[in-house]
Image (cartoon, grey):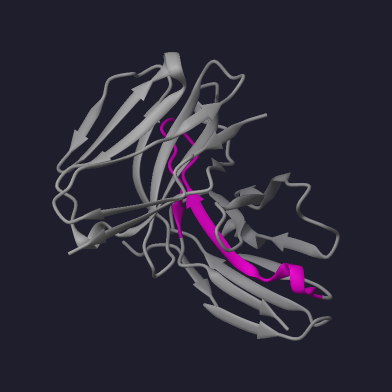
Amino acid sequence: AQKVTQAQTEISVVEKEDVTLDCVYETRDTTYYLFWYKQPPSGELVFLIRRNSFDEQNEISGRYSWNFQKSTSSFNFTITASQVVDSAVYFCALSRNAGGTSYGKLTFGQGTILTVHP
Amino acid sequence: DTGVSQNPRHKITKRGQNVTFRCDPISEHNRLYWYRQTLGQGPEFLTYFQNEAQLEKSRLLSDRFSAERPKGSFSTLEIQRTEQGDSAMYLCASSSKGYQETQYFGPGTRLLVL
């Protein structure tokens, strides 16, 4: 069975602070995909990033960066110089990778509520 | 390029009534997923379709729930004899089957059963 744990229920920061959201996963699969989604107050889940299990290279996209460490089963997400518009619920998710294609369903963590104060 | 759309956005119903939700995926996507999200939780998988075939159903999907995707385009999710425990956000996502598959979500339908 697959499991995703986001231990931080809520994080509150002041604008311009850096913030890291933790994600730990469990899976018996040797290959899999990891994802981060953002859910603003409007409710729609917005895709942020996908990472293959065989690609441990970290990634930076503007103010966002992701640290994937297979040895510790973690896929953490850092926002640098946070802004009020970053306030949202962030979800980490996991899917299987069977034969080079995702195996459909996503297993989500419980989410981390990020509040950025001006 | 239009995204995933869902209708209605909100639905209030009385216990025991039937409700139906619709999802229109991104036009070139052949996979469609339904998830349910309750307050303070992450989305939970309900079912998914590849084209018109329903390939997997979660044990969460009781006999009162049914989903269809006729002609492999839009999908409907019906809940019969609604219960208060069915109150949740119902999310639809679509994707293209293949390497580096990514699911894109619609805005959801929020159901409240009184």
Note whether A47 is above or below A118 in the view shown.
above
Q: Nearer the viewer, residue A96 or A115?
A: A115
Q: What is the quadrant of residue B11 in the picture?
A: bottom right
Where residue B92 appears, as percent x and y from the top left, is 54, 59
User: Which residue sits at x=56%, y=72%?
Assistant: B109
Q: Quadrant of the C terminus of chain B?
A: bottom right
Q: Which residues are magenta?
A: B82-105
User: Which residue sits at x=86%, y=60%?
Assistant: B63
Q: Quadrant of the N terminus of chain B?
A: bottom left
| Horizontal side, residue B79 vs residue B3: left or right | right
Where residue A28 appears, as percent x and y from the top left, is 62, 19
Q: What is the quadrant of residue B107 in the picture?
A: bottom left
Where residue A92 appears, as percent x and y from the top left, is 45, 41
| Horizontal side, residue B96 vs residue A66: left or right | right
| Horizontal side, residue B46 vs residue B107: left or right | right
Note whether A14 is above or below B112 in the view shown.
above
Where residue A107 appears, as percent x and y from the top left, is 57, 40
User: Which residue sits at x=53%, y=48%?
Assistant: A110
Magenta-span inclusion, residue B100: yes
Note whether A21 is above or below A27 in the view shown.
below
User: Which residue sits at x=46%, y=63%?
Assistant: B106
